[in-house]
């Protein structure tokens, strides 16, 4: 414990002061998994006043095993966010690769098989410090992170939803509990009535403060029901997102037809947000025109949410549904420069 008896490592204080024309904007990005990594990879090119607020409902893979065995927050999405913010030096990139390294046992059944080194490191810091936020701050210092990473809640969350599917000509509804199971079950039916357990779980206080003090809040891209929507299902965080004086940007995915959102249009994605958080308004919805469909219909749906649609080509040139950091950064930079 002597190693941690001194002051916490210095991390750029994202969200602690409103930006001005002479300073970098203070930005909070919310999401999880690969979607959040994409937005962070873009935003880190524009500001160091950056806070990632990450979902903590993952219960699959390495994170799920550690969560069940140790009763901790699932570290996987937090690790990915840290890796996306690593310093662009040999030191930062090396420690990023260490954090992302996965063990592979010879028979595929070893106790370390498929565990990410960064998951184990983060949990080690949590156990030594007894504080998830402080542990993530130390991990961020190791990578020279350009910003900070926070969990959305101070306790592990469970996501639950109903799957509506057709069975021999009749509709069947079944409840699925757990992020991994819900994502898999979505392959055979439509997701509806998503909720977080425990109901009314406490949000991370540092995350609430960051949202309150931000200049911009970026929600999405990511798995719509299990990475984007959970931030609006947590009561304290939803209230903070609705109250903040920050400008709000919703970033759309590059594919509408995912396992969770099969058969849904871009407008349907917006309707999900409105249904679960009717008080949440946006200033901007950023979308690639290739996935919008009827542009006028989409613009009307955005206007009903209080904002305007901004279109830009933000995907990689290969055509895969993956955001290009430079293109996405260019679109965000144009938004940040508007008055």
Image (tube, grey):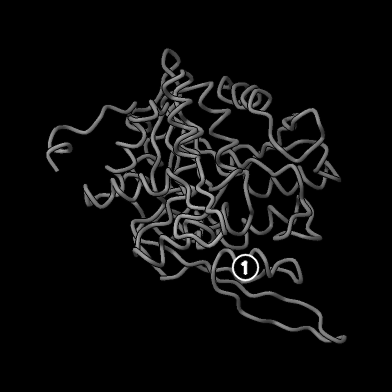
- On the rendered structure, is 329 left or right of 102? right
Question: Does 213 appear above or below 231?
Answer: above
Which residue is rendered at x = 72% and y = 76% of the image? 164
Question: Does 66 appear above or below 100?
Answer: below
Which residue is rendered at x = 30% and y = 45% of the image? 133
Q: Quadrant of residue 146?
A: top left
* Label 1 environment density (alpha carbons within 10 Å; few <14, some 14–19, many ≥20): many
- On the rendered structure, is 150 left or right of 8? right
Total numbered circles: 1
Q: Position of residue 141 (x, y in %)?
A: 33, 30
Which residue is rendered at x = 25% and y = 52% of the image? 127
Q: Which residue is mark 1?
A: 182
Which residue is rendered at x = 70% and y = 67% of the image? 186
The quarter of the image holding the N terminus is top left
Q: Secondary structure at mark 1?
A: helix
Q: Position of residue 163 (x, y in %)?
A: 68, 74
Q: Position of residue 86 (x, y in %)?
A: 45, 28
Q: Quadrant of residue 153?
A: bottom left
- On the rendered structure, is 168 left or right of 247? right
Q: Nearer the viewer, residue 145 or 121?
A: 121
Work out which residue is located at the far front of the displayed protein and give it: 106
Question: Does 214 appear above or below 264?
Answer: above
Q: Position of residue 161 (x, y in %)?
A: 60, 72
Question: Does 290 appear above or below 180?
Answer: above
The quarter of the image holding the C terminus is top right
Q: Nearer the viewer, residue 141 or 309?
A: 141
Work out which residue is located at the far top of the displayed protein and give it: 22
């Amino acid at each position: 414990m002597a190693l941690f008896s001194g002051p916490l490592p210095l991390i750029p204080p994202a969200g602690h002061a409103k930006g001005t024309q002479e300073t970098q904007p203070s930005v909070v990005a919310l999401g999880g998994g690969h979607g959040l990594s994409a937005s962070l990879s873009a935003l880190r090119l524009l500001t160091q006043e950056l806070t990632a607020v990450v979902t903590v409902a993952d219960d699959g893979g390495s994170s799920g095993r550690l969560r069940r065995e140790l009763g901790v927050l699932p570290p996987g999405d937090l690790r990915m966010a840290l890796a996306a913010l690593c310093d662009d030096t040999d030191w930062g990139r090396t420690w990023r690769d260490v954090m992302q390294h996965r063990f592979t046992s010879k028979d595929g059944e070893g106790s370390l098989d498929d565990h990410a080194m960064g998951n184990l490191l983060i949990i080690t810091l949590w156990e030594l410090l007894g504080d998830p936020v402080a542990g993530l701050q130390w991990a961020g210092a190791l990578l020279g992170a350009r910003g900070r990473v926070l969990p959305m809640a101070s306790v592990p969350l469970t996501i639950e939803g109903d799957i509506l599917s057709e069975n021999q000509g009749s509709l069947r509804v079944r409840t699925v509990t757990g992020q991994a199971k819900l994502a898999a079950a979505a392959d055979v039916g439509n997701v509806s009535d998503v909720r977080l357990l425990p109901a009314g779980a406490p949000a991370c206080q540092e995350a609430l403060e960051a949202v309150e003090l931000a200049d911009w809040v970026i929600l999405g891209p990511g798995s719509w029901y299990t990475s984007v929507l959970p931030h609006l299902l947590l009561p304290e965080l939803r209230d903070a997102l609705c109250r903040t004086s920050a400008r709000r940007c919703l970033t759309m995915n590059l594919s509408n037809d995912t396992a969770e959102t099969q058969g849904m249009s871009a407008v349907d994605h917006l309707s999900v947000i409105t249904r679960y958080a009717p008080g949440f308004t946006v200033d901007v919805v950023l979308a690639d025109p290739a996935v919008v469909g009827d542009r006028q219909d989409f613009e009307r749906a955005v206007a009903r949410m209080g904002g305007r649609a901004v279109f830009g080509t933000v995907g990689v040139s290969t055509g895969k549904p993956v955001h290009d950091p430079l293109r996405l950064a260019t679109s965000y930079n144009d938004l940040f420069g508007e008055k």
